[in-house]
Image: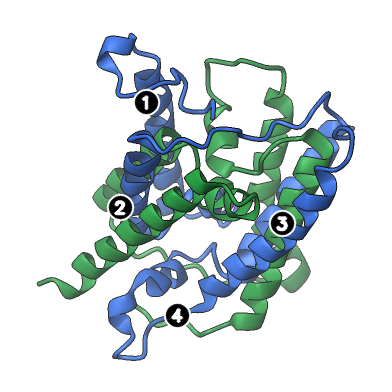
Chain colours: A green, B blue
Amino acid sequence: MITTPFTPMASLLGGALIGLSAVLLMWATGRIAGVSGIAARLFPPYEDGELAGRFAFVAGLVIAPVLVRIVTGSFPEQTILAATPVLIIAGLLTGFGAVWGSGCTSGHGVCGLSRLSVRSLVATITFMATGIVTVFLMRHWS
Amino acid sequence: MTITVQFAIGLIFGLGLVVSGMSNPAKVLNFLDLGGIPGGTWDASLAFVMAGAVAVTFIGFSRVLKLPRPVFAERFYVPTRKDIDLRIVAGPAIFGIGWGLAGFCPGPALTALGFGSASAFIFVAAMCVGMVLARFVGRLPSSTRLVTPADPLET
């Protein structure tokens, strides 16, 4: 592992931007800014005519670091330590679990908690707990 | 128009992920690593991401949802379910394991694509397979599925 600096102000500001985005999406489209729900609906079966809008939202997500690079001259810090087999297993579990559980960090953690949803509270506590246990086992269980 | 607006909203979300540090899996894993508290390697930053995001969303939603309707849609699509079923625990439990293994949740994983690393592409490809699989399993005949509704995305 590598250590990362504690960045409370940048993280608070970034979090506020995420919140602003969630509020704007609700204001504009009436939809929850849940990234797993938006991403999963990029694939069939299609149930509504919102596909183009979802692609546009995801395109915005992908373009964001490119914009940061254009403005600041370099990409921000990003370190991916997981090996390929771990990335594949982690990706499968993340995608399956997020959709099976009706949401991820954004849909349940941000939007759901903000709506005081009991289901989202249960979901958020659960994925935080299994995430913490997984990291503990990976790093401290040997 | 609505497409451009949704692109801009996605861009703000992505900028939030980058500025907050969520787009860096190493930072996410150091947040989840409570075992790092004694050694001083625990990074509490992501609690501030959550605090900032929930504070703004809580205030913003309470105002927006008082409007008669959204700007570009007929109505608000807000989840109404309140029941605690198996899937609302099992899904997030599985998701959390994946999150803890690589440090990516869906939003930051998609934003990571913009950094152009091969690792992010591998993760996102696998994540998409997992997402499609979850919807497919959800649509199997009711005798073989855990709980209703058929499509996990309908909450």
Q: A93 above or below A124?
A: above
For the residues labelled 3 and 4, say whether their Cβ atoms are less than 8 Å apart: no
Residue at screen point 30% across, 52% down = B97
Q: Is residue B120 visible?
A: yes
Q: Which residue is mark 1?
A: B133
Asked if residue A1 shows in the view, the reply is no
Mark 2, other Cα within 10 Å: few <14 / some 14–19 / many ≥20: many
Residue B97's disc number = 2
Mark 3 or mark 2, which has the lower sequence index?
A: 3
Query: Label 2 lies in what chain?
Result: B
Other-residue count near label 3 (Cα within 10 Å), few / some / many at <14 / 14–19 / ≥20: many
Foreground of the two, A31 or A36? A31
Does A82 sit left or right of A73 as displayed? left
Q: Tag 3, which chain?
A: B
Please identify the quadrant where the C terminus of chain B is shown. Answer: top right
Q: CA distance from mark 3 to mark 1?
A: 31 Å
Q: Which residue is mark 4?
A: B43
Nearest to N terminus: mark 1 or mark 2: 2
